[in-house]
């Protein structure tokens, strides 16, 4: 978004941001009055955002019970690729894996309990939203995905080698 704002010459009129809060559920019926309570709210001003406007937004965020954190958009995009976007891709991939590998009687699905449900809960959030997120932050997502793939390949190697110390 910051790049688009810059192309339009609107950097002085824009302050990006969003809370690091929410759930996989969408719509007004799933609203929570305590959603922002003690949640980080990332504020990403441009270099031309007026300091008083940034401070005003920071105070508004604080008044909502959230914890404002001012970051450059590059730092925000890289961090969220690792802590938000990658976990969604992993969760969705696990759901697809079970769907594709399950037996006809859906034994995997029937046996899936707490751990699997905990790690895949976010896979049920809006696919359109996640499609758009992936299309807007591809370089950072690809960078952290490369590192994750490296770690998964390393784990597979340790399992294949029965390397108890490495595991």
Image (cartoon, helix red, strand yellow):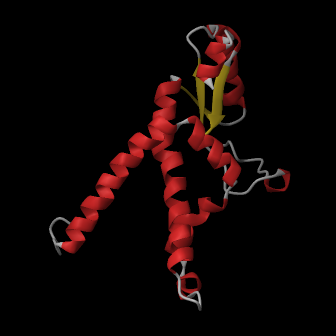
Q: Quadrant of the N terminus?
A: top right
Q: Tell me if I can see residue 38 in this picture.
A: no
Q: How many marks?
A: 0
Residue for point 34% across, 47% down: 147
Q: Residue furthest right?
A: 29
Horizontal and vertical percent position of residue 73: 53, 25
Taking 16 as reference, is 155 left or right? Answer: left
Residue for point 72% across, 47% down: 34
Horizontal and vertical percent position of residue 99: 57, 75
Residue for point 65% across, 42% down: 132
Q: Tell me if I can see residue 12 in this picture.
A: yes
- Closest to the observer: 140 or 104? 104
Indicate the quadrant where residue 21 lies.
top right
Indicate the quadrant where residue 88 lies.
bottom right
Horizontal and vertical percent position of residue 151: 30, 55
Q: Quadrant of the C terminus?
A: bottom left
Taking 125 as reference, is 76 left or right? Answer: left
């Amino acid at each position: 978004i910051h790049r688009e704002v810059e192309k339009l010459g609107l950097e002085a009129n824009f302050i990006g941001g969003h809370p690091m809060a929410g759930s996989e559920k969408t719509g007004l019926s799933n609203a929570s009055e305590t959603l922002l309570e003690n949640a980080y709210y990332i504020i990403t001003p441009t270099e031309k955002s007026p300091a008083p406007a940034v401070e005003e937004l920071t105070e508004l965020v604080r008044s909502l019970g959230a914890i404002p954190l001012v970051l450059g958009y590059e730092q925000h995009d890289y961090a969220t690729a690792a802590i938000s976007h990658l976990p969604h891709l992993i969760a969705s991939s696990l759901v697809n894996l079970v769907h594709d590998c399950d037996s006809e009687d859906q034994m995997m699905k029937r046996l899936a309990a707490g751990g699997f449900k905990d790690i895949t809960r976010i896979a049920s959030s809006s696919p359109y939203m996640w499609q758009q997120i992936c299309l807007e932050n591809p370089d950072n997502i690809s960078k952290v995905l490369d590192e994750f793939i490296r770690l998964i390949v390393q784990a597979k190697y340790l399992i294949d080698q029965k390397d108890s110390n490495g595991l």
